[in-house]
Image (cartoon, rainbow, N blue to C red):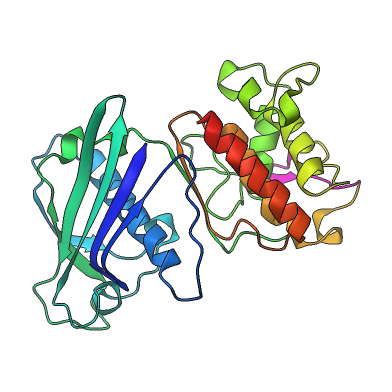
Amino acid sequence: MITSIEYTNFKSLKKVTIPFNKITVLAGLNSAGKSSVIQGLLLSRALADFLHGRESLDIQDIKKFPLNGDYLLSLGSATEAISKDTGKQFEIAVKGTKGEVTNEFRNLFYTTEALSDKLYDVSVKVGNNYKSTFIYETALYYLNAERLGPRIRHWVNEKGGDLNCGYRGEYTVEVLAHTQANSDPEFLVPDSKFLGGRKLEGFQDIPKYARAWMDYITPGADIGAANIIGKIRSAEISVNGNTPPNVGFGISYVLPIVVTGLLAKPGAVIIVENPEAHLHPKGQSNLGFFLGQIASSM
């Protein structure tokens, strides 16, 4: 698991170390740096993905690495990514443990060019131990603050890869459709994620427990069966027998969080921006309980 992230001259984080535990909550005033903490972690993960695809190469210095794109990153230019009046570089070190082994993924992002609003890439001096770092093996789920609101039709992921809800929750209904009444052990919900420790009858599938948790977080929310439809594939679902646009934003915003929490395996990292958005205060409190239980099961 990630134990801390150290930032040097990254945006407003001139010299900051953020400790991590099973569950870590970032709270504070607007523009205090909360989003920057997440962006730095996602940028490091994007770099890890880049290196992982080229691990047979001896990469120590990347000439051009984008600041925008992967994981919905929109850092803008190097001028915006580097703390003002600190030079032309920033450093991010992700530290963590795997079993009894501790290591770090430390990288220096820099530019040799004059800082400009048109400079959207940086160079990277890669840490010496990047091939042995745990960050390659850590499943990471990210839900952006700007998740999809209610939709009559939902997207289906045609790109392949591991099942996930997407960065905006766009594939949530597909995940529910794929996992309902599915006896594949990979998609069965462990008892550590049961609401109130109560085992439900039949397959211990994700949709069944998603419905139970949704009714707890947003009482009265009855999530219908999810279906993949059409030759041009899309997905649909009902809430209380209605199409999602007829029941408001809160349910559509929180459902991807619940499904991701039930889908994630032990050791995974789940990043959720603004989990409380569009929820009643009681729903926010109940969602906090859900996230705490999911964290303890990881």
Where is residue 232 shown, x and y percent of the image? 66, 46
Where is residue 173 shown, x and y percent of the image? 69, 43
Quick check: 31 left or right of 153?
left
Q: Residue at x 13, y 70 (%)?
A: 111
Asked whether residue 179 is in view, the answer is yes
Dominant SS type (magenta): loop
Q: Residue at x 33, y 42 (%)?
A: 3
- Per the image, is 45 magenta? no
Residue range in magenta is 228-240
Quick check: 126 left or right of 9?
left
Image position of 196 with respect to 140: above or below: above
Quick check: 207 left or right of 30?
right
Q: Residue at x 32, y 48 (%)?
A: 4
Where is residue 128 shown, x and y percent of the image? 9, 43
In the orientation shown, which residue stands out farthest toward the right?
241
Q: Quadrant of the N terminus?
A: top left
Q: Nearer the viewer, residue 6 or 105?
A: 6
